[in-house]
Amino acid sequence: MEIQLTQTEENYLKSIYSLELSSSKNVSTTLLAKKMKTKASSVTDMIKKLADKDFVDYKKYRGVSLTKGGNTIAVKIVRKHRLWEVFLVNKLEYSWDEVHEIAEQLEHIKSDTLIDKLEEFLEFPTHDPHGDPIPDKEGNIEHHKNIMLSSVKVENSCKIIGVKDSSSEFLKYLDSKNIHLGSIVKVISKEVFDNSITIEINKQLLSISHQISKNLFVKIL
Amino acid sequence: MEIQLTQTEENYLKSIYSLELSSSKNVSTTLLAKKMKTKASSVTDMIKKLADKDFVDYKKYRGVSLTKGGNTIAVKIVRKHRLWEVFLVNKLEYSWDEVHEIAEQLEHIKSDTLIDKLEEFLEFPTHDPHGDPIPDKEGNIEHHKNIMLSSVKVENSCKIIGVKDSSSEFLKYLDSKNIHLGSIVKVISKEVFDNSITIEINKQLLSISHQISKNLFVKIL
DNA sequence: CATAATTATTAGATTAGTCTAAATTTTTAT
DNA sequence: ATAAAAATTTAGACTAATCTAATAATTATG
């Protein structure tokens, strides 16, 4: 007796989930419309439908938030998305900047058993190729505290553990500079006027803009 | 500039393809409706749409047939379906009776590169888990001539190379009798009144109904 | 070959998701 | 505090895919 949602409904829940993670306030219609690349009026319609089905709490003009049930579904989709990304990169040899679009489709495949078998086949990865944590079968997800490279103090060293922006352009830039997950970085100096920083990576000095450094998750060493 | 078809359109083309394979006449509205589990009126609507897009040839009251372009698309979907089935059985350890439904979804994933990478990962399989041939990248497909076990003469031996019916029930029956692709079978005797046959398989005698034997593809040894 | 039976098509609705334009509510800024 | 701006909702329309019921064409049969 699985609840059957359409792909569109699933995508709305996923978007609400991700917007909730980055703000704590209710998700506004306009923000959701931007995320879903649709119009606010369409969002209002969909929100009503999701509210009728008890996946979101909704008060007119006050935005939405996921219910327990809605959250559970959103996390499941995130789990599927990330496991498929691991498959695409680790098994099919895609690069990390190519997999998002395909995983967007694969995440909607419906099966009670598929994703758990895939997880086993992939040997229970804990993170996707962009460093995002993979929820387990029960929906538990370990949110790493988000320390950005931009906030690391001069002289400190850290390890790159994730990317915030996973656009193809950003990832390709990182590839071109040989920056990847696991790279060890030491902050050498910081410019006050533009917040750019000079880092030591792969035994070389490299200057990176604030735009870059604020999109890299790190773990202080 | 890929042609973007809906899943439903793709499914119609696939169904027309499979019905064309088994009759050589134009595919009738009713037959297609049965295959698609929908109503004849819906089929008429869809056929018109597909004809407008030049994927089928259609004359009112005369049924449809695939155009070159329609056939190309249908074969691509068949290729995707069968490669995903191989993945599910060989890599995720599904049994051959569980994979059809999931492959029905996976076959609609859109990507210019995915299926070729999957094919390589699977080491270029030539047949799916039910013995059906997998079209290559160019759409070439080797149709094995369809010799059924039911037509094998007494005293002759053959190898099981495919199943015509791939319903879960049929496949589970075969599993229970330890009949699988590659099994060597000798026809010992044939009953005239019900066309059931006795075969020797795995060094044992087994009686099987016509219903079974006419759904097993074999290669005479 | 005429009429019954079958098969196929059309007409008119319905549902999901979207859109534009108009109306309403909330927020922001004098 | 109130007017302007911004955000949101509503109304009405559109497309894709489906359905039922009515109509039309084909085929089968006596």
Image (cartoon, coloured by chain):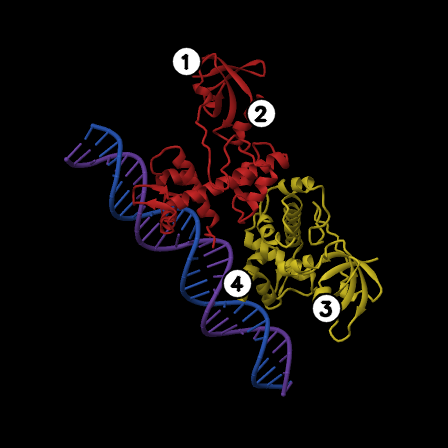
Chain colours: A yellow, B red, C purple, D blue
Front disc: 2 or 4: 2
Q: Chain of mark 2?
A: B
Place residue B18 in its image quadrant: top left
Where is residue A27 drawn, in percent x and y?
Answer: 64, 64
Residue named by callout 4 = A42
Residue named by callout 1 = B192
- C-alpha separation, residue under disc 3 versus residue under disc 4: 36 Å
Element type at marker 3? helix
Where is residue B185 drawn, in percent x and y?
Answer: 53, 17
Question: Answer yes or no: do the residues labelled 3 and 4 have beta carbons within 8 Å?
Answer: no
Query: Which residue shows up at 37% across the image and 45% down it?
Result: B56
Where is residue A47 drawn, in percent x and y?
Answer: 57, 60
Q: Chain of mark 1?
A: B
Q: Would you call the spot at circle 1 few (<14 residues within 10 Å), some (14-19), or many (20 or more)?
A: few
Q: Chain of mark 4?
A: A
Callout 1 amino acid: Val
Q: Is residue A51 above or below residue B118?
A: below
Front disc: 2 or 3: 3
- C-alpha separation, residue under disc 3 versus residue under disc 1: 84 Å
Callout 2 amino acid: Asp
Element type at marker 1? loop
Q: Is residue D18 above or below residue B183?
A: below
Callout 4 amino acid: Ser
